[in-house]
Each structure stands twice: as C-alpha cells, then as structure tokens.
Amino acid sequence: MTMENTKINEPLITKKDIFRTNWRWLWSSQICWNYERMMSTGYLYTMLPILKKIYPEKDDFIEMMSIHNQFFNTNAYVGGFIVGMDIALEKKVELKLKMLLSG
C-alpha cells in the first residue's frame, strides 16, 4: 500500500467525504436490497469514496470492496451510525499506514 504525497497532519478523509457518505447512505441504503446480502450493495456504495482514498492500489481496493459487500442488515435509521463507526475504523487504518510509510 502506498500513500504518495500525504503528510501525517493532513487528513485523507475530510468532512466533505463524511457528508458524502451520509448522503449516499440516506439515498441508497435500501436501493439494492436482496435476500442474499440484504443491504450490502447500498453499504458498499456508501463506503466507496472512503475506500478509494484509503486504498489507492487496485488489488487492495478490490479486496476491501469484497469485504464491505458481505451480508449486512440493519434498520435504515441506525445504519448511519454504523457507517460512521466504519469510517472511524478506516481512519485508524489510514493513520497507521501514514505512520508506517513516513518512516
């Protein structure tokens, strides 16, 4: 994994990204609902902007897409909290990557 041109103090995930994911969740949480994976397609669509920024390499990005497209089911109103928690976990991964790559 590489994160070129990033500094430790610069956040990769911005407030704009968080608002974008919130809107994506509100509009797409149940748009692709099915019996096999329930809401996972909407959840993956919601997380795509965050995943694209944290995992710029294609192989890592594809792996994370498959992880985020597993069975997912919740109440649509509570899902926003779950998305927020997932973003927080991804930010933690981002910070660890930056520290490792900076030396």
Image (spheres, rainbow, N blue to C red):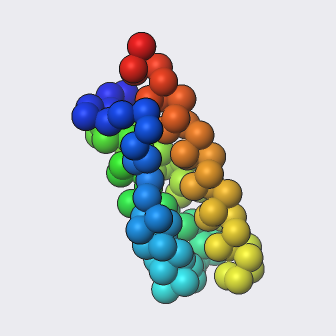
* Farthest left residue in view: 5
Q: In which quarter of the image is residue 45?
A: bottom left
Judge by depth and name the residue closer to the eye, 57 or 103. Answer: 103
* Farthest top residue in view: 103
Q: Residue at coordinates 42% horizontally, 13% vertically from top-left?
A: 103
Q: Is residue 52 above or below residue 17?
A: above
Q: Residue at coordinates 40% horizontally, 43% vertically from top-left?
A: 10
Judge by depth and name the residue closer to the eye, 94 or 52. Answer: 94
Relative image position of residue 69 (x, y in whole percent): 53, 57
Asked whether residue 71 is in view, the answer is no
Asked whether residue 44 is in view, the answer is yes
Q: Residue at coordinates 48% horizontally, 24% vertically from top-left?
A: 99
Relative image position of residue 53 (x, y in whole percent): 36, 49
Relative image position of residue 42 (x, y in whole percent): 51, 73
Q: Quadrant of residue 93?
A: top right
Judge by depth and name the residue closer to the eye, 8 or 93. Answer: 8
Relative image position of residue 39 (x, y in whole percent): 60, 72
**Which of the image's four quarters has the N terminus?**
top left
Left or right of 81 in this view: 21: left
The number of numbered badges drawn on the structure is 0
Left or right of 93 in this view: 10: left
Judge by depth and name the residue closer to the eye, 79 or 71. Answer: 79
